Image: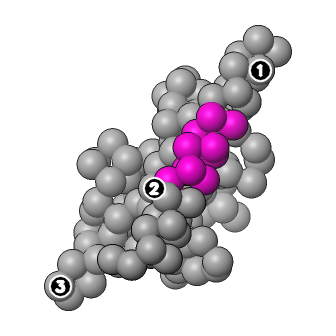
């Protein structure tokens, strides 16, 4: 490894440390001001990430489809998790048959773990009742 690679690695580590510290500060301030609630754009995706997280951070494609359905995603819409500048999910394995949760998304789950566990059952009920209403129409 040359000096440039070493420097880039150190910079990445420092950035990760700074992000972690900023999230800790945010959690501390949020805790003092009230519940640490994720921003709206994270819901429902944070519940999908949570399901992958509690399974060790890696699942197969069929598990992702099941999880997606649990939270109101059409399986065809799950591709959004793999798209964009910073996808939250990535294919891995020799045959790209496993799906892993990216570390940055994992950190969000960890930051909001208490909120997720407190609200997950109600969210599932809301999603399931919405799906039932759509089917009855």
The CA span between labels 1 and 3 is 44 Å
Q: Which residues are magenta?
A: 13-22
Residue under the image location 63 percent in, 29 percent down: 24
21 or 120, which is in the foreground? 21
| First reached walking from the N terminus: tag 2 or tag 1 | 1
Residue behind mark 3: 94
> Which residue appears farthest toward the front when viewing the image?
3
Query: Is label 2 in a helix, a strand or a loop?
Result: helix
Front in this rendered view, residue 97 or 87: 87
Q: Nearer the viewer, mark 3 or mark 2?
A: 2
Q: What is the spatial separation of the Cα atoms under label 3 and label 2, in whole angstroms?
A: 20 Å
Residue at position x 27%, y 84% from top? 96
Q: Horizontal placement of 54 versus 18: left or right?
A: left
- Residue 103 marker: 2
Hey, which residue is sitting farthest right in the picture?
33
> Where in the figure is residue 108, as x and y percent of width and height?
57, 44
Work out whether mark 3 precedes mark 2 in sequence or the reverse, and give the earlier one.
3
At 66% from the left and 61% from the top, the residue drawn is: 134
* Residue indicated by mark 1: 29
Q: Nearer the viewer, mark 1 or mark 3?
A: 1
Q: Does residue 16 show up?
A: yes
Image: 7 above or below 77? above
Give the main secondary structure, helix, strand or loop, of the magenta stretch: helix
């Amino acid at each position: 490894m040359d000096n440039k690679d070493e420097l880039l690695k150190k910079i990445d580590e420092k950035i990760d440390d700074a992000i972690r510290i900023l999230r800790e500060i945010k959690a501390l301030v949020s805790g003092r001001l009230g519940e640490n609630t994720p921003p709206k754009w994270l819901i429902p995706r944070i519940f999908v990430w949570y399901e992958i997280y509690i399974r060790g951070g890696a699942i197969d494609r069929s598990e992702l489809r099941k999880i997606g359905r649990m939270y109101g995603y059409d399986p065809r819409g799950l591709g959004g998790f793999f798209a964009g500048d910073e996808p939250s999910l990535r294919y891995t394995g020799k045959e790209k048959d496993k799906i892993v949760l990216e570390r940055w998304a994992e950190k969000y789950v960890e930051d909001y773990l208490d909120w997720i566990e407190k609200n997950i059952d109600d969210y599932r009920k809301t999603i399931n009742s919405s799906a039932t209403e759509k089917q009855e129409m």
